[in-house]
Image (spheres, rainbow, N blue to C red):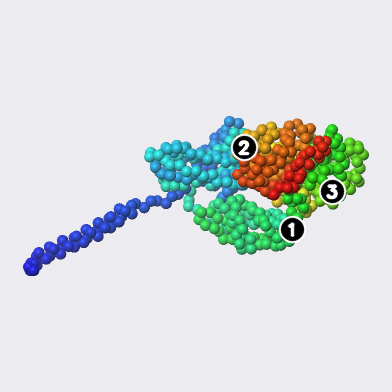
Amino acid sequence: MPILSSTRLRVLRTLWTLRTLWTATAVAALALGFAGPASAADVNNAKNAGFESGLSGWTCSASSGTTVSSPVHGGSAALKATPAGQDNARCVQTVAVRPSSTYTLSAWVQGGYAYLGATGTGTTDVSTWTPDSASWKQLTTTFTTGAATTSVSVYTHGWYGQAAYLADDVSVYGPDGGGGGDPVPTIPSAPGGLTVSGTSSSSVSLAWNAVSGATGYNVYRDGTKVTAVTGTSATVTGLAASTSYGFQVTATNSAGESAKSGTVTGRTSATGGGGGAVPKHAVTGYWQNFNNGATVQKLSAVQSQYDIIAVAFADATTTPGAVTFNLDSAGLGGYTVDQFKADIKAKQAAGKKVIVSVGGQNGTVSVSDSASAANFANSVYGLMQTYGFDGVDIDLENGLNATYMSQALRSLAAKAGSGLVLTMAPQTIDMQSTSNAYFQTALNVKDILTVVNMQYYNSGSMLGCDGKVYSQGSVDFLTALACIQLEGGLAPSQVGLGLPASPSGAGSGYVSPTVVNNALDCLTRGTGCGSFKPSRTYPDLRGAMTWSTNWDAAAGNAWSNAVGPHVHGLP
C-alpha cells in the first residue's frame, strides 16, 4: 500500500465529511418530500351557524325569518322561517370555501317542509329536504367546489303554503375557506332546572333548561344512561309501577359531555296509564245521542265488537270552555237518564269503555285561556262523576288552541287518574303537519293519550308522508296519511283509522270493510298494500273507528262484523 501525504489525507477527510452531510440532508429532504405539507384541520365554515347572534350573516326572503328561543336544537336560539304566498322562506348565507375541495353541508330542522342546499359550487349544486317533522332531524349532503370557486351560497327554505320550519346548527364542514367560522365549541355546562313533568305506571317524563352550546342531552336513570335526545325533554319508558327512580341529565356537543345535573326523583303511578284496560287492538264506535235517520239505539244495543263507545255529543254552555250533557230522551224513544247510566255500567262490566265526545260537526267549544281550560276540565270531570264516563273524546272540527287544550286535558287527567281514556278524532287537514294545533295537542299529551282516530272521510285529496297526493277512498289514502302520524311522533298504539260505517254515514270517503282491513294489514303486517308501502310495519297499531254504531246497525252491522274481528286478530 502506498503511503499518502498529510495534505492528501486532509482533502480526503474533507470530501468524506461533505459526502456524509449531503447524504443525511438528502435523506431528510426526501423524507420531507414524501410527507408533504401538513393539511389544516377541517372546520365549520358557516358563520352564526346556531343563530345565537340573531340573523347576522343570513338573509331571508320577504322578511320571512326570525330567531326563536324555543324550540332549539342547540344553544339558545334557532331560525324560524314562515312561507307565505309565493315566498318559500329562503334564508341564505355566503360561505368562503377553498377551490377543488369537498365539504359536508348539514343542518338540524323541525316543523314544516324543510330544504337545505348549496349553489355556486362551481360543479354540481346540491340540495336535500324532508317533509314535516315533529322533532329535530338532521339533513346532510356533500358538494365539491370548482377549481376557481372561493365562495358558495348555502340556503334553507320551506315550501309554499306549508307551515313554518325551524333550522339550527348549520355546518359547512371542510377545509378552512378563510372566511372565519364560529369559534370551536367548548364542553357545555351541566343542565339546570331538571324537573319531573309527568308520570304514568310505566314512564317518567322529564324537562330541563337549554344549555348554551349544547347540541344534545343524555338522560341517566339511577346512574345509567338510558336515552339521548336533542331537545330539552324526554320520557323514560319501560319502568315498573309504583317505583321511585333517580334521574340526571348531561349536555353534549362535539367537544364532549358536561357534568351531570342534580338528581330528581320520579315515581311511577300504581296502575294503568292512558287508556286504562283498553285492549291492545281496539275498535271505537260513536253512539248517536240523536235521531238523524240512522237506527236509533239504546247504549245497551251497541254491537259487542266495539271496545270504546264514544257518546256523541256533549253540549257547550254559556260558560267559556264548559260542557254539559243532555240525553235526547224524546229522540231516542223515551230513553231515560237512569237507563242510560245503567247501560254505561253494564257495558263497563262487559269490559267496554264509554266516553263522552266533545264537538262534532256542529259543536263549538272554545278553550282559549287558562280560565276556560279549567272550566273544560272541571265540567268534563263532573260528567264523568255524574254518568260514569271513562274519559273524553276531542272531536272539535272548528279549531282548537293547542296550549290551552293541552292544559285542560292535563288538568282533567290529574283529577281522573291514570285510568282516563283520552281519544281524538281530527280531520285529515288537522294532521298534515306537526305544526297544526290538533297534532301539537296530541303530541303535548302523548303520555296520557289513548288513541287518535283521524277521520279519513269528508276530506278530498291530501298529502301522504312521502309527499305525494292521495285521493280519499283507497288503501293508499289510509296508509300514506296514517304514516304521517306514525312517523310524526305518535306511538303506533295511539293511531287508529276512522271510517264511516256506511255510505250514509258521511258525505264522501266511504270504503268497504275490505279496504279498511287491507289498510290495517298493510300497516301492521306489510301485506295488502296499494302503491304506497310503508318503510316499516307497525304491529302495535291500535285499530279502527267508525261513525257510527247507529249507521252500522242500519247497514246490518256489516262494518263491525267485518272490521271488528280483523282488528282483534291483528298481531
In the figure, 133 relative to 505: above or below? below
Q: Which residue is found at the position 91% from the left and 38% from the top?
A: 333
Label drawn at residue 416: none
Residue tagged 1? 269
Q: Decide if residue 54 is on the left or right side of residue 304.
A: left
Q: Which quadrant does the N terminus fall into?
A: bottom left
Q: Which residue is found at the position 58% from the left and 43% from the top?
A: 166
In this view of the protein, can residue 558 be seen by the observer?
Answer: yes
In space, the residues marked 2 and 1 are separated at their CA atoms by: 44 Å
Element type where label 2 sits in the image: loop
Instruction: Please state the horizontal and vertical placement of residue 452, each as a whole percent of the image.
Output: 72, 44
Of residues 192 and 97, the one nearer the viewer is 97
Element type where label 1 sits in the image: loop
In space, the residues marked 3 and 1 are separated at their CA atoms by: 26 Å
What's under tag 1, amino acid-wise?
Ser
What's under tag 2, amino acid-wise?
Ser
Q: Closer to the N terminus: mark 2 or mark 1?
A: 1
Instruction: Please state the horizontal and vertical placement of residue 128, each as a whole percent of the image.
Output: 53, 40
In this view of the protein, can residue 446 be seen by the observer?
Answer: no
Q: Closer to the N terminus: mark 3 or mark 1?
A: 1
Q: Closer to the N terminus: mark 3 or mark 2?
A: 3
Instruction: Please state the horizontal and vertical placement of residue 488, each as a whole percent of the image.
Output: 64, 44
Are there few (<14), some (14-19), or many (20+) residues within 10 Å of tag 2? few
Q: Which residue is found at the position 55% from the left and 55% from the top?
A: 252
Residue tagged 2? 531
Does the residue at mark 2 contact the one at mark 1 (Cβ under 8 Å)? no
Of circles 3 and 2, which is in front? 2
Q: Decide if residue 113 is on the left or right side of residue 510.
A: left
Q: Which residue is found at the position 64% from the left and 46% from the top?
A: 537
Are there few (<14), some (14-19), or many (20+) residues within 10 Å of tag 3? many
Are there few (<14), some (14-19), or many (20+) residues within 10 Å of tag 1? many
